[in-house]
Image (cartoon, helix red, strand yellow):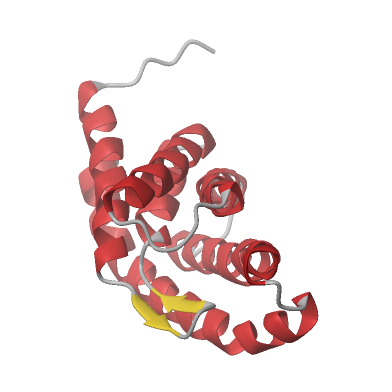
Amino acid sequence: MNKKISTKDLTTIALLTALSVVFKFFSINVGDTRRYSFILLPIMISGIFYGPLAGAITGGLGDIIGILVLPQGIFHPGFTLTAILTGFSSGIISKKISNTNIKNNNLVTSLACSIFNFLIVGLFLNTIWLSQLTGASYWPLLISRIIKSIIEMAMNWLLLYLIFPKLNKIIVK
């Protein structure tokens, strides 16, 4: 498959990457192991609308540029891997759902991406990385992060669901 990417698409993906970096400045840190943010939202949008590869690139570049622009603590490649998986999995989930006959595609896609990325990828993988960095035991750390992940997932899902129709009109033109 030899699909060429348009200049508009490339520009939008670059803007989503930059937006992910900008959202890092507006994160709310609660203790050493919890941070509330919308950093993953542009990464999920990139994956949903432009596919798994674009989502993975947005996630990887967004995380690396974010570390260079606003370093917070020690760099750990695991967090970059989590960002890459977030974009990639959003693209895969979106493609799988769009190939079905589900009536409310926007709701199901935004909810499935949010649940998978925040409660599966983010909660479990980021807890591993935080456990490695802080030396804290995995299970107590995981349990302490469950509520945080549910709140962050709900915030990001709601925002993604609300802007999904507008993005459909702008991006899918």
Quarter of the rendering containing residue 123: bottom right
The outermost residue toward the top is: 2
Quarter of the rendering containing residue 134: bottom right
Task: Locate the C terminus and report the quarter of the image it occupies.
Answer: top left
Q: Is residue 139 above or below residue 162?
A: below
The residue positioned 51% from the left and 33% from the top of the image is 53
Q: In the picture provided, is 93 more to the left or to the right than 47?
A: right
Residue 173 seen anywhere in this rendered image of the structure: no
Task: Locate the N terminus and report the quarter of the image it occupies.
Answer: top right
The residue positioned 35% from the left and 54% from the top of the image is 42
Looking at the image, how many numbered discs can be counted on the residues? 0
Residue 10 seen anywhere in this rendered image of the structure: yes
The residue positioned 31% from the left and 62% from the top of the image is 24
Name the one closer to the observer, 117 or 3.
117
Name the one closer to the observer, 155 or 27.
27
Name the one closer to the observer, 164 or 37.
37
Query: Residue 130's x, y, as percent?
Result: 62, 68
Query: Residue 112's x, y, as percent?
Result: 58, 64
Q: Is residue 165 above or below residue 156?
A: above
Quarter of the rendering containing residue 27: bottom left
Query: Residue 150's x, y, as percent?
Result: 55, 83
